[in-house]
Amino acid sequence: WDLGRAAEQIGEDERDAVLARMRVAAPSSAASDEGGGVEGVAQPLHVAAHAGDLWSTRALVALGAKVNGKDCSGATPIAQAAFHGHLDVAACLLEANADPKAKDVDGLSAVEWAREMGHAPLAALLQRSSSA
């Protein structure tokens, strides 16, 4: 999956639809200029990863969402995908350079969450990526 090509193919209407569908309430005064939102607040990419929504994950990554942004529990989008067993979403995030070793407030990484929740194939993918 080519992120650059995907970004070119996402039209303004599709972008607006994705953002409207994935919008998470956050104070507008705290919005980030970097396209990733507010650190410590669940962002659209977190919501897409949590839901296993591969299409929205790809679109948001192509639009510049922060793949390593953290929500209030310190979880990254890839940790959300790992916790819920969404292997395809995790693979997409890995392609976008998500860090599977990033720790949340409990000190657990995406690899550890995948293992803890019994998602062995996903844990193996994340472990291989962590070792690379």
Image: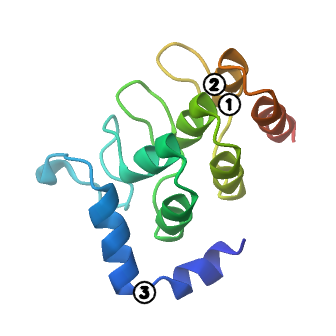
Q: How many numbered marks, from 0 up? A: 3
Q: How far apart are marks 2 and 3 (CA)?
A: 34 Å
Q: Is residue 23 left or right of residue 104?
A: left
Percent of width and height locating residue 129 = 81, 41
**Residue at the image position 84 percent from the left and 32 percent from the top:** 124
**Residue at the image position 30 percent from the left and 38 percent from the top:** 41
Residue type indicated by callout 1: Lys
Residue type indicated by callout 2: Ser
Q: Distance between the residues labelled 1 and 3?
A: 33 Å
> To which residue does mark 3 refer?
11
Q: Which one is closest to the eye, mark 1 or mark 3? A: 3
Q: Are marks 1 and 2 in contact (CB under 8 Å)?
A: yes
Percent of width and height locating residue 45 = 45, 51
Q: Quadrant of the N terminus?
A: bottom right
Q: Is residue 129 left or right of residue 75?
A: right
Q: 119 or 8, which lies in front?
A: 119
Counting residues from the start of the chain, the first of labels 2 and 3 encountered is 3
Percent of width and height locating residue 32 = 29, 55
Which mark, residue 7? Answer: none
Q: Distance between the residues labelled 1 and 2?
A: 5 Å
Which mark, residue 101? Answer: 1
Counting residues from the start of the chain, the first of labels 1 and 3 encountered is 3
Q: Which one is closest to the eye, mark 2 or mark 3? A: 3
Q: Is mark 2 on a helix, strand or loop?
A: loop
Within 10 angstroms of label 1, few (less than 14), some, or many (20 or more) residues? some
Percent of width and height locating residue 96 = 65, 58
Q: Is mark 1 on a helix, strand or loop?
A: loop
Residue type indicated by callout 3: Gly
Q: Quadrant of the C terminus?
A: top right
> To which residue does mark 2 refer?
109
Counting residues from the start of the chain, the first of labels 1 and 2 encountered is 1
Based on the displayed image, in which of its 4 quarters is residue 99 positioned?
top right
